[in-house]
Structure formats: C-alpha cells, structure tokens
C-alpha cells in the first residue's frame, strides 16, 4: 500500500465537489457540511487508518472519504442536505484511538448572532461555528458584511483542534 486507502461512493471527487458547491449556492438546501480535510494525529499503520476511514464512511451523509496515512489526514465530501456534524467525524476518529487536529471545512449554513454579537454559522444539525477572520485572508471575513442575519452563506475555513463546539471557524473564503 502506498499510504493512501480509498473508499469511493458515487462520482469522482471533483464532480461531487463541484456539484455540492453548485447545489449549496443555487438551492435552498438545508445547512450542511460540504467538504472536510481533517488532520489526524497518531496514525502509523495501514490497518488502523483503514479502520478510521471505514468508520467515517459509515456515517450517514458521507459521500466519499479518502484517508492518507502519509499526510495524516482524511478528506471527505458529503451528500446534499446531510445532517452530519464535525463532532461526529471527530468522535469517529477518537473511537479509533487517534486525535483529530485542525480541520479545513466548507460549510453552508445560516448566519446568526450569538449572545456576544458575534457572527455564527448554524447548520441544520444545530452545530455552531463562531466566525473569525483568517490571518491569511482577512478580506474574506469582511465580505460577510454583505450577508445578513438569517441568510445562507457558504464558507471555507479552518477549525482548530478541540473536543466539542461551538467551534471557531477562521474564514478563508466566502463562496
């Protein structure tokens, strides 16, 4: 094995990604996780990595997952209108005795304000992402000014390691 284990569900990753983003932007779909690149600490054997991959692939709403032992990450795309949460994915990783670290995600969700007046994305599954500027792309966060409370936004950014939400999402791109 070359360090990459793959389980495929459906079309090629590029087609799935393009389709999901198109649906997220053009349809009143329920708020959802669209893409994930999750860093995983501690994977050092192929059978263990395959176990993590299968556990993530078995979650309801996962379209495709590819795990790279060499890179120490899992990349996943999700079905339209899924209700999967970042916490479910991270728990699947922890159940295999590994530690989820930073994740890069794309999520489509409704903009809301928390009790402190901060902008948050709230998914259909109830997961909350407190939005903050990404140091490398502060202009993306400023673009959120054009998105009103109660409106849907599709955001890509980084979520640090942590045990449970609400998560902090450093906004790198607004789609």
Image (cartoon, grey):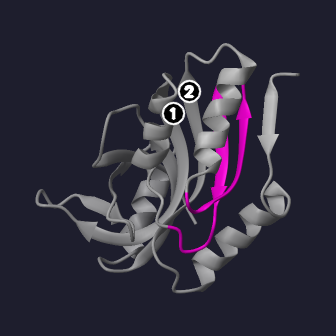
Q: Residue furthest left?
A: 115
| Residue 73 lies in the magenta-colored region | yes
Q: Report the side of 161 relative to 23 (left or right).
A: left
Expressed as whole percent of the image width and height from the top left, the position of residue 1 reads: 88, 22
Expressed as whole percent of the image width and height from the top left, the position of residue 18 reads: 75, 67
Q: Quadrant of the C terminus?
A: bottom right
Expressed as whole percent of the image width and height from the top left, the position of residue 61 reads: 58, 63
Residue 147 disc label: none
Mark 1 element type: helix
Q: Is residue 63 shown above or below 168?
A: below
- Identified at 64% across, 31% down, the residue is 51
Residue 40 disc label: 2
Which sits in the foreground, 43 or 149? 43
Mark 2 element type: strand
Nearer to us of marks 1 and 2 is 1
Magenta stretch in the rendered image = 60-82
Residue bearing mark 1: 93
Q: Report the side of 38 relative to 8 (left or right).
A: left
Decide: marks 1, 2 in contact (CB < 8 A)? Answer: yes
Q: Report the side of 145 relative to 69 (left or right).
A: left
- Using a 10 Å C-alpha cutoff, classify the residue at mark 1 as few (fewer than 14 neighbours), some (14 to 19) or many (20 or more): many
Q: Report the side of 70 relative to 144 (left or right).
A: right
- Identified at 55% across, 60% down, the residue is 60
């Amino acid at each position: 094995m070359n360090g990459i284990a793959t389980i495929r569900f459906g079309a090629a990753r590029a087609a799935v990604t393009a389709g999901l983003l198109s649906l997220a932007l053009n349809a009143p779909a329920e708020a959802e996780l669209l893409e994930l690149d999750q860093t995983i600490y501690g994977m050092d054997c192929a059978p263990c990595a395959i176990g993590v991959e299968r556990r993530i692939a078995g979650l309801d709403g996962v379209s495709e997952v590819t795990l790279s032992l060499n890179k120490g990450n899992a990349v996943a795309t999700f079905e339209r209108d899924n209700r999967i949460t970042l916490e479910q994915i991270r728990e699947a990783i922890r159940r295999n005795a590994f530690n989820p670290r930073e994740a890069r995600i794309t999520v489509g969700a409704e903009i809301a304000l928390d009790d402190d007046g901060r902008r948050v994305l709230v998914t259909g599954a109830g997961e909350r992402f407190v939005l903050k500027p990404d140091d490398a792309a502060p202009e993306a966060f400023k673009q959120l000014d054009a998105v009103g409370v109660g409106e849907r936004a599709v955001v890509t950014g980084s979520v640090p390691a942590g045990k449970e939400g609400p998560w902090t999402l450093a906004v790198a791109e607004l789609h």
